[in-house]
Image (cartoon, rainbow, N blue to C red):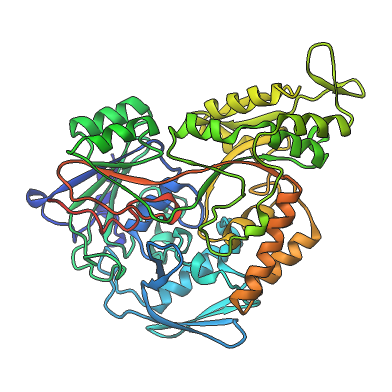
Amino acid sequence: MFRRLSLPLLGLGLAVALAAPAFAQKTVTIVREIDTDRYDPHRSTARSTSEVLFMAGDTLVNLDYDMKTVVPGLAKSWKVSEDGKVYTFKLRDDVTFCNGKKFTAKDVVATYERWMAPETKGVVKWRAGELDQVVAVDDHTVDYKLKQPFSELLYQMTQAFHTIIDIDQVKALGADFGVKGFNGTGPYCFESWTPRDQTVLVKHAGYKWGPSFYKSTSPQVDKIVWKVIPEENTRVAGMKTGQSDASQSGYLPYWSLQEFQADKKFAVQKADFYFWTFFIGFKVDKESVSDARVRKAMNLAVDQKAITDAVTFGYGEPANTYISPGVLDFAKTANTKDYGEDVAKANQLLDEAGWKKGADGFRYKDGKKLSPLMYGFTGSWKEIAEAVQGDLRKVGIDMQIQLFDATVAWGKLATQEFDAFGMSFPYVSAGDALNLYFRSANTPTPNRMNWKDPETDELLKAGSAALSEKVRYENYAKVQEKVADAAVWIPLYHEPLYAIVGAKLKPVKAHGNYGCAFYKGLGLEFK
């Protein structure tokens, strides 16, 4: 049905005239667990969206493997004004969209105007900074003007939310933009999407403007099929039988990694730098968890190492910090003594908080049982939640668990119905993680903790507006110390990222950006 719909819309890039001939196509099938709701950079935060948009589109700048070095993308160079409010980007003059349309400064302006427009209902707009306006100085020069300096801007611009779009296609498709088509400038062109089944991308002929850290800045395969397979065992079997060519940890379970590593038909490579953390957060204004002593006790009751080993088969790193120690602006001072299993201290804190054990072994206060309700996702969270539940029962806390499929969970997690929640998230820097979760303006989601603290807001504002790395770090370090001391989360583990490819492909170096191991897809190459 998609093909019948797309043929009349060739001019919009919905069918790709620049694709390689069918008889010559070399196809790579990448298997993943879940799909997205749309391929719209301004209206989706899903990893599955970014996986495709990184390949089908481009951003002004790109992120190197070290997750700290920003390199040219659609912008070949840039400079920043002394006050940090104006970024001037010099754009490449040899870029085309998949439908042949020339890329110019007007496309950059239209992209950001559309993202900021109220009718777009754009997500995570803070990632663009306090944007004043984007001005096309000439066809290949853009002034990106901010109301306030934003020290995170270049790092944020490496994210798929900043993908440059074709505004003509947006106007033509309306609500179907990112559903029936996506016309980008990326190394691969959007051919078709069958929801909950597969997304097909084809080689963008003539593409040569990929990031310099790749061996080749042009695509080396003709077609990429992102295949959705919900069942874990089926994903593993598909890789072993050659029905699928590539995948990554998270989609392939940890228990299978050792088998793939031992099989010479497969190449398994770990991302040197990757930041994705699993945690349980507390709604700090809920009665059962409003006392920091209770939250600290719950942290001390949980055996993070045992959970990490059980869930990741030893591949993950138990977390005693909210963000990974390898990330930009990580504060060592945020390491706290209130993490790591200490049942005796947990019991002491609960006693001090007035929660006394009853005859049934559970704790009560003023006739109320200490039984916080946790919301989370199905899948691996079942094992995590049940392990945490078991640990908490050792100190008299009867945590209740309700897990939901992803299609339902995001809506449920935007409510005030629960006391605690399970979550995992990617980040590119300390500022990225902290601004996402701890700004008061981000309640009720993604600040699901209802952490509304004026000092935190001021520190985040100062860190974001900093004109030096030193000042940025100092402010972000104070936020890390503050929220850790308040035990707003139970950090569980920092997960690793592996790229796994089969016998047809050369080994692929995993990239850590937003958990998208294959990033631009330019590392995919046949033997």
Residue farthest right in this picture: 366
Extreme-left residue of the structure: 23
Q: Residue at x 63, y 48 (%)?
A: 446
Q: Does residue 171 appear anywhere in the picture? A: yes
The mark tally for this picture is 0
Describe residue 41's horizontal placement relative to residue 344 as left or right.
left
Q: Nearer the viewer, residue 139 or 345?
A: 345
Q: Residue at x 30, y 67 (%)?
A: 213
Residue at screen point 71% across, 56% down: 481
Give the residue displayed 89% in from the left and 30% down from the top.
354
Observer-nearest residue: 132 or 443? 443
Residue 8 image point, x, y percent: 26, 53
Q: Position of residue 313 (x, y in %)?
A: 43, 32
Image quarter of residue 160: bottom left
Percent of width and height locating residue 294: 79, 35
Q: Is residue 125 visible?
A: no
Observer-nearest residue: 164 or 471? Answer: 471
Question: Viewed as shown, does residue 243 lie left or right of 120?
Answer: left
Report which quarter residue 355 is drawn in.
top right
Q: Quadrant of residue 493?
A: top right
Residue extending furthest toward the top: 359
Would you place residue 76 above or below residue 454 in this image? below
Q: Position of residue 399 (x, y in %)?
A: 70, 25
Rendered view: 521 above or below 112:
above
Query: Viewed as shown, does residue 266 lie left or right of 429?
Result: left
- The quadrant of the image that shows the N terminus is top left
